[in-house]
Image: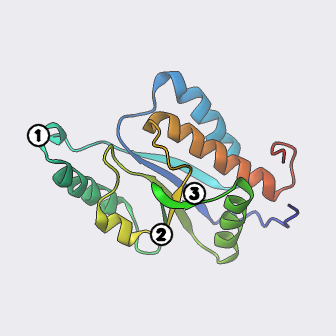
Amino acid sequence: MVVSFFICRNMKIVLMSVGKPHDTNLKDAIDDFTNRIKKYFTVEWQIIAAPKNAAVLSEADLKKAEAILIQNQLQKDDYLMLMDERGKQFSSPELALFIQQRANESCKKIVFLIGGAFGADESISKRANHICSFSKMVFPHQIFRLMLAEQIYRACSILRNEKYHHI
């Protein structure tokens, strides 16, 4: 895939996840890929702690409480990509093209959101500009954070025709 890549330093990528801080066993790998993305875009992680009363809430109430916390972090013009196993699947080159299209549209910020343990509330799904799935399978959040950072880095390397991605 040969694509001319416009490095859009004005576009920010936010990797947002509901849950605990990065697992110490995975933190170095997550940080490594996050730092690699910085070669192309401004990037940051936003970890949203679950509500303090999460253990006593029903699944629906927990999702609603998490939705409020998520919505408080979003700006109205943020492009929200919700990660959900029921979403559209992309190949790595398709994810690269997706990111390039957002840059071409002068998108200021793409937020890749990993919802809580029970997924995202319907209000977040409706707010999402796009819903993406890596697989029909469900992954532990900590491992998925690493997978997401790696795939975004891979997408950037595809756009720059760098050697990281092999077809």
Residue projecting furthest to the bottom: 105
Residue, disc 1: 56
* Quadrant that contains the N terminus: bottom right
Q: Is residue 1 above or below residue 62?
A: below
The disc, 2 or 3, on the residue closer to the chain's N-terminal end is 3
Asked whether the viewer can see residue 83, the reply is no
Q: Is residue 46 above or below residue 32?
A: below
Asked whether the viewer can see residue 28, the reply is yes
The numbered mark at residue 83 is none
Element under disc 1: helix
Q: Position of residue 153 (x, y in %)?
A: 69, 47
Q: Please tell me which residue is depicted at 84% across the width and 66% down the height of the picture.
A: 3
Q: How far apart are the alpha carbons under marks 2 and 1?
A: 32 Å
Q: Is residue 27 above or below residue 55?
A: above
Q: How far apart are the alpha carbons under marks 2 and 3?
A: 10 Å
Mark 2 Cα within 10 Å, few/some/many (few <14, many 20+)?
some
Q: Please tell me which residue is depicted at 35% across the width and 40% down the height of the picture.
A: 19
Q: Position of residue 164 (x, y in %)?
A: 82, 42
Q: Please tell me which residue is depicted at 47% across the width and 39% down the height of the picture.
A: 139
Residue, disc 2: 78
The three-letter code of the residue at mark 1 reads Val
Q: Please tell me which residue is depicted at 53% across the width and 59% down the height of the picture.
A: 132
The three-letter code of the residue at mark 2 reads Asp
User: In the rendered view, does 141 fall on the left or right side of 110?
Assistant: left
Give residue 51's quadrant in the image: top left
